[in-house]
Structures are given as structure tokens and as C-alpha cells.
Image (tube, rainbow, N blue to C red):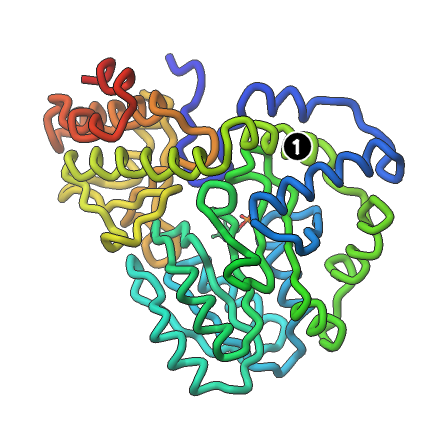
Amino acid sequence: MVFQQQLRIPGPTPLPERVVRAAARPMVDHRGPEFSALLTTVTSGVQRVFGTANPVLVLTCSGSGGLESAIANLVSPGDRVVAAGCGNFGDRFGTIAAAFGADVVRLEAEWGEPVEPDDLARVLEAHPAARVVLLTHNETSTGVLNPLAGLVRVSREADRVVVVDCVSSASCVEVEVDRLGIDVAITASQKGFMAPPGIAFVCVGERAWELAEHSRSPRFYFDWRQARRQAEQGSTPWTPAMAVLYAVEEGLRMLDEEGLERVWARHRRLARAVQAGLEALGLPLFAAAGHRSPTVTSALPAPGLDVGTYRRLLRERYGVVIGGGQGRMTGRLLRVGHMGAVADGDVVQVLWAMEQALEELNVAPADGRALRAAAPHLTPEAAAAAV
Ligand SMILES: Cc1ncc(COP(=O)(O)O)c(C=O)c1O
């Protein structure tokens, strides 16, 4: 009997009990003072997460809507844009730009590898007319954390406007918007903020505002100028997903209580535990060493292991839900999310279940190897309980 699912996909992430309760609060007037106070609390929390003084726009949509808003506000039809990606989400960002009539130059690293700053510098040099560069911080489909500082540096040196998809990194991994000089950073409620899906946050710097003023792309719902004007009055242009904002407010409170640096350290440590556990299970890690994501670990299936069968068994027998591959890696990859509300005990449960299920499928014996390998990265209490 499975009583509660262990949601270990890379978003939406599990909701802490207090976040669920916050989301269930009664509605207020979205043009009234309570909402205005909520908006201020949430946007200043997101500014802290992003390390920025730039305004944060609150859009009611998922992360993809936030990405689309950047294209709709910055890119005019016919503009050349560089899209540097290394997986499904980077690909999609370029595809959104193409849908808005941009002339998209794609720099695509091999899946499992990061985008290299030197390669980006070469592409930028070859395309001086491309004003906008699209980057993905954490490529969720492959479990790769791109070298953001280097990518932003070469983009700024080439005087480009840098737009970064931080959907699956923000709050779990440091993103220093002002120090690095990121012009636009985008994230969403359902990942590191431990809230349900429904809100995208878009943090827009001065150079991007300038571009948005002059771009000729049609836009209405996602018009940043409208969102900024309304934010200055303490509201949003359209009815916002208020329950999600209540949840984000509580998620931010939890992040503040733990302390952002501790949150980032927890993600790095638990990622190492999951990586060690999966390797011990004979599931080869997919992302290149040195570039593995703190929020999602990707691994290839062991020989003879059917990804669909394995995921189904984990879900039905153990209540553990992990991700599969996306795009060209559909059916060929396992992805374990450790993003947002994740503790040592969660990692113990996931690795234990993954090991038991491999034995059930006659792939490898369950002799405790995953938890033994993970133990050095767990707290002493969790390690002692696990092995
Ligand atoms: C890196 C990245 N970008 C974009 C998205 C798309 O976000 P959404 O599904 O909220 O539209 C995701 C979702 O997983 C993501 O991980």
C-alpha cells in the first residue's frame, strides 16, 4: 500500500505542509492593500534569491510563459538571436524565439555536456548582429549545470543582452544577477520555491528595459511595460494566481529561515549523495563530471533495464516517482529530482526503493550498496539509520 507519493521528479516539487496550508487561505481583493503587501513581500524575496535590485515582474503562467515573455518583449521579427543550449529546454527557448520570427543561430552542446564559454564567444563573434543571447542555467533534461558566470561574461564582453532561464536553478543554486550582469533572469513557482505551478518571475535589468521599449514584437498579456506600470501601483495587470503567491510567500519564508547559503549547500550535498547512490547501482551518470546539477541527477539505465517498466514499478510498489528522459532521450534516461523540499531521509527512501526495484527486475541484487555509497554525503544521523 502506498500512502503518499515521494515526488522525485525535477518539478513540480513536493509541497511542504505549511505551504499547502498557506495556499488554502481565502482570497483577497487583488487591487487592494493586502494583495499589494503580498506582492511586495514576494518580489523582494525573489530579488534576494536572485541577488538583484532589478524589478521582478510577476506573470501568471508557468516558466515557459516567462521565457516567451522575454522573447515577446526583446526580439522583433527578423532579429538575429543566439540560443545556446545543451538539452531539451535550451532547444525550446530557441524554438520560442523562432516562433516569434527571430532568425535563430543555435549553439548546441552535446547532451550531457555544458555549453562552453569559448564556443559561445566564437558564435557571438561570428554574429555581431545578434543583440540577444538565450542561456539555460540548469538544463533539467540532462541534469547539467552550465557555467553561468563564464557564459554571461563572454556575452557581456561582446555587449549582448543576456537572458537566462533559471527555472530549475533559482533558490537551489546561487544566481548572482547583479554581480554577473544578467539582463533578464526567469524562474517559476513550482521548483525551488516549493510552491505549486502557476507563476513565473521575470527579473529585468536596465539594458533589457531599453530594448523592450524599442522592440516591434506584438505583445499584450505578457507586455513587461504594462506589468511594471501596474507593479508600481502594487498590483498586476491581470488577475494573478493568488493562491500560488500565498504559497510562494511561505516557501520564501522557509528559505529565509534556513538561509540561502545553507539551502544551496544542502542541494549540493544531497546531489552528491544521489550521484554516489546511482553509480553504485550500476546506473552510469549522464551529465559530465564537474557539471552535474545540484537539483536533478540524470543516469543511463543499466543494460537490460527498461526505463518505463522501472519507473512504473517504483511508482506503483514504492510510491517513488522519478523522471524519465525528454526529447531525444525519451525512454533512455532516468532523472531523479532533489530540488526544493528535499531532506536526507528523502534521498534514503529514493535510493532504497531504486535498489529494491532493480532486484525485483533481476538487474542487480539489493545488498545496500546504494545507501553505503551515499552515506558519506548524508548527515551522520541519516547515514547511521540508512546503513
Ligand atoms: C530549465 C527549464 N526551463 C523551462 C521549463 C519550463 O517550465 P514550465 O514547465 O513551468 O513551463 C522547465 C520545466 O521543467 C525547466 O526545467
Q: Helix, strand or loop at disc 1?
A: helix
User: In the image, 190: left or right of 36?
Assistant: left
Establish if 385 lies above or below 30.
above
At 62% from the left and 55% from the top, the residue drawn is 66
Quarter occupied by residue 305: top left
**Does mark 1 have its CB less than 8 Å from ligand 1?**
no
- Residue receiving disc 1: 249
Is 337 or 147 nearer to us in this picture?
Answer: 147
At 49% from the left and 62% from the top, the residue drawn is 92
At 46% from the left and 59% from the top, the residue drawn is 136
Residue 326, horizontal then vertical, whole percent? 38, 52
User: In the image, 176: left or right of 242?
Assistant: left
Quarter occupied by residue 79: bottom right
Q: Amino acid at mark 1?
A: Glu
Residue 387, horizontal then vertical, whole percent? 18, 17
Question: Badge 1: how crowded within 10 Å, few (<14), some, or many (20+)?
Answer: many
Is 291 or 86 nearer to us in this picture?
Answer: 291
User: In the image, 367: left or right of 84?
Assistant: left
At 28% from the left and 18% from the top, the residue drawn is 382
Is 185 or 73 nearer to us in this picture?
Answer: 185
The quarter of the image holding the N terminus is top left
User: In the image, 157: left or right of 284?
Assistant: right
Quarter occupied by residue 335: top left
Is 163 or 195 nearer to us in this picture?
Answer: 163
